């Protein structure tokens, strides 16, 4: 795949390979890119690769200048879901693919897109020619020159941003932007990072399963897998990838889980359904209805993850801690972060709100349907409960001991602003721990120790990632692209109970959007995270979803 001459002088270059094989073409192209002193700044490689897990997967690379996306699915379906602008295509289409893929492929091309010597039938070649690909007879390659090409994505005029909030969401945003060469100013109202919802001693991470592989399941899987790869490239994270066991609630729930296991036949390193005997033997306690085991799940200390991400930013990050209450204002094409006296702390063309429900105190984000949900975690001394080889969860979770402490919880208290520890929440957590372990006598005299944090939760329990909608509508809107946006104002909000896995992928998605890069998720999933989704259908009346979110399994 000789592309050296084509990427020179470009900021970025995107290649689609419809036959990944063993990744040999990617390896060769990566080596050529590294060896070329005139290479493009960023190389994006997207490939179709049959996998045991459906959907798309972005795999972080050792060099921040390279992205790799693997798509699993039929050619036409994968192209419809791909959000990218292609510079080169290595096309291998079987006769069984028909010609339905040609139109979605052409929609991804820009003038000058190169179609490398292609494995296509005569019928497919004719369809490609009609779509705007001009074939060169001598080598079988083609150049795209449609009369109605898709416009190239806009690149940022300058790579500077302000990030508000230094929890998991904001810390990941800083790291993903700095990795792309941005200068980032981080503003945090507290004196240190991870002072609110990200301040718990332990957070757990695991995928989500469903029989129909619905949008939340697909999103959680993509985020979980990306986070595992991403964390491998950071130093100083405290925690353990010890596995997570999720117990079935009752026989009916177990029946549903068996059906999921039979339908998807997940790889064992991703998810294993265990019947009662096997689950009980691993747990060392009764698991009467069976359980899921997620071998790559585990727990991590969120503050250590924040610290690792911020440390990775190096000199491209300027941090302002202890900033107190911050306002924002746009003037002269720049966003300004303002202190309590109205003075400008920092300015940049791009601003990212990653401060949870604090974002709704700002007029520009006041219409976002975000709820502040209280969660009390109980801290149990090592020895108060049996030693665990993994995280255990069902209606609540219990971690293995770390530093002499098990974390158990957390409560899910709507419309409850109380920041203080209280016995009733502690009792609720302990009751769930006793139920998990099948022992009503556990921790009867446990002292009231723990921590209260407040989750930021949306109506559908999915994050809000991307450009924030302008509350001043221009008319009835049925499509996300028709909704007005605040220029340069973005959100990373609503991570609910899954902030550990959401933070890396959501930040990667936002950074790719800001850079005009291929997106790391399918179009349907990107749309499901759009902060303006709650305005669809009735933007003229400022309609938003107002149903309070319900508790979810950890």
Image (cartoon, rainbow, N blue to C red):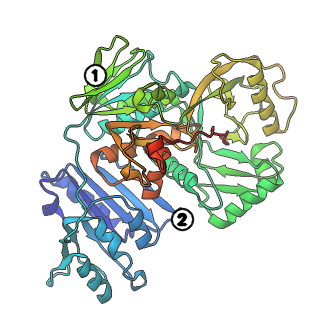
Q: Which mark is residue 363?
A: none
Label 1: which residue? 346
Left or right: 236 with respect to 45?
right
Q: Which of marks 1 and 2 is nearer the N terminus?
A: 2
The C terminus lies in which quarter of the figure?
top right
The quadrant where residue 283 appears: top right
- Considering depth in this image, is 13 or 459 the residue closer to the camera? 459
Residue 530 locus on image (x, y percent):
44, 46
Tell me if residue 311 comes above or below residue 142 in the rendering. Answer: above
Quadrant occupied by the N terminus: bottom left
| Residue 84 % position (x, y) | 32, 58
| Frontmost residue, 450 versus 487 | 487
Mark 2 nearby-residue class (10 Å; few <14, some 14–19, many ≥20): few
Which residue is disc 2 drawn over?
52
Outermost residue, top side: 341
Q: Residue at left 27%, top 30%? A: 316
Q: In this view, does 490 lie above or below 377?
A: below
Q: Position of residue 447 (x, y in %)?
A: 76, 16
Which label sits in the foreground, 1 or 2? Answer: 1
| Residue drawn at 37 percent across, 75 percent down | 101
Q: How crowded is mark 1: few (under 14 residues within 10 Å), some or many (20 or more)?
A: some
Q: Outermost residue, right direction?
A: 441
């Amino acid at each position: 795949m000789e592309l050296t001459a084509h990427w020179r002088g470009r900021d970025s270059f995107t290649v689609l390979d419809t036959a990944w094989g063993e990744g040999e073409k990617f390896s060769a192209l990566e080596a050529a890119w590294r060896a070329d002193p005139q290479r493009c700044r960023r190389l994006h490689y997207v490939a179709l690769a049959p996998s045991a897990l459906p959907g798309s997967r972005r795999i972080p690379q050792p060099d921040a200048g390279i992205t790799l996306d693997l798509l699993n699915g039929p050619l036409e379906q994968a192209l419809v879901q791909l959000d990218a602008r292609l510079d080169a295509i290595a096309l291998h289409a079987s006769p069984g693919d028909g010609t339905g893929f040609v139109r979605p492929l052409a929609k991804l091309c820009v003038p000058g897109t190169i179609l490398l010597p292609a494995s296509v039938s005569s019928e497919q070649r004719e369809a490609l020619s009609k779509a705007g690909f001009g074939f060169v007879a001598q080598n079988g390659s083609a150049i795209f020159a449609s009369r109605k090409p898709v416009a190239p994505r806009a690149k940022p005029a300058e790579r500077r941003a302000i990030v508000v909030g230094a929890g998991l969401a904001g810390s990941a945003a800083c790291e993903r932007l700095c990795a792309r060469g941005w200068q980032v100013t981080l503003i945090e109202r507290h004196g240190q990072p991870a002072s609110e919802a990200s301040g718990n001693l332990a957070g757990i991470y695991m995928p989500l399963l469903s029989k129909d592989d619905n949008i939340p399941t697909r999103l959680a899987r993509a985020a979980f897998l990306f986070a595992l790869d991403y964390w491998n490239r950071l130093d100083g994270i405290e925690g353990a990838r010890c596995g997570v066991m999720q117990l079935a609630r009752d026989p009916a729930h177990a029946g549903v889980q068996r059906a999921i296991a039979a339908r998807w036949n997940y790889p064992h390193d991703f998810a294993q359904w265990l019947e009662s005997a096997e689950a009980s033997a691993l747990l060392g306690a009764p698991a009467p209805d069976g359980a899921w085991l997620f071998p790559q799940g585990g727990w991590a200390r969120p503050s250590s993850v924040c610290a690792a991400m911020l440390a990775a930013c190096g000199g491209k990050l300027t941090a302002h801690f202890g900033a107190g209450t911050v306002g924002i204002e746009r003037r002269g094409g720049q966003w300004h972060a303002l202190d309590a006296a109205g003075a400008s702390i920092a300015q940049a063309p791009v601003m990212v709100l990653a401060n949870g429900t604090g974002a709704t105190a700002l007029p520009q984000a006041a219409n976002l349907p975000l709820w502040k949900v209280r969660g009390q975690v109980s801290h149990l001394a090592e020895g108060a409960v049996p030693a665990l080889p993994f995280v255990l969860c069902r209606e609540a979770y219990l971690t293995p001991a770390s530093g002499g402490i098990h974390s158990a919880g957390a409560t899910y208290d709507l419309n409850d602003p109380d920041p203080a520890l209280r016995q009733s929440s502690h009792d609720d957590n302990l009751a769930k721990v006793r139920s998990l372990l099948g022992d009503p006598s556990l921790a009867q005299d446990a002292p009231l120790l723990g921590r209260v944090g407040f989750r930021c939760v949306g109506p559908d329990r999915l994050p809000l990632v991307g450009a924030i909608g302008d509350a001043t509508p221009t008319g009835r809107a049925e499509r996300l692209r028709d909704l007005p946006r605040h220029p340069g104002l973005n959100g990373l909000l609503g991570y609910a109970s899954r902030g550990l896995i959401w933070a890396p992928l959501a930040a990667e998605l936002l950074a790719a959007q800001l850079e005009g890069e291929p997106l790391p998720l399918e179009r349907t999933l990107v749309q499901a995270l759009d902060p303006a989704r709650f305005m669809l259908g009735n933007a003229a009346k400022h309609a938003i979803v107002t149903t309070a979110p319900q508790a979810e399994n950890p």
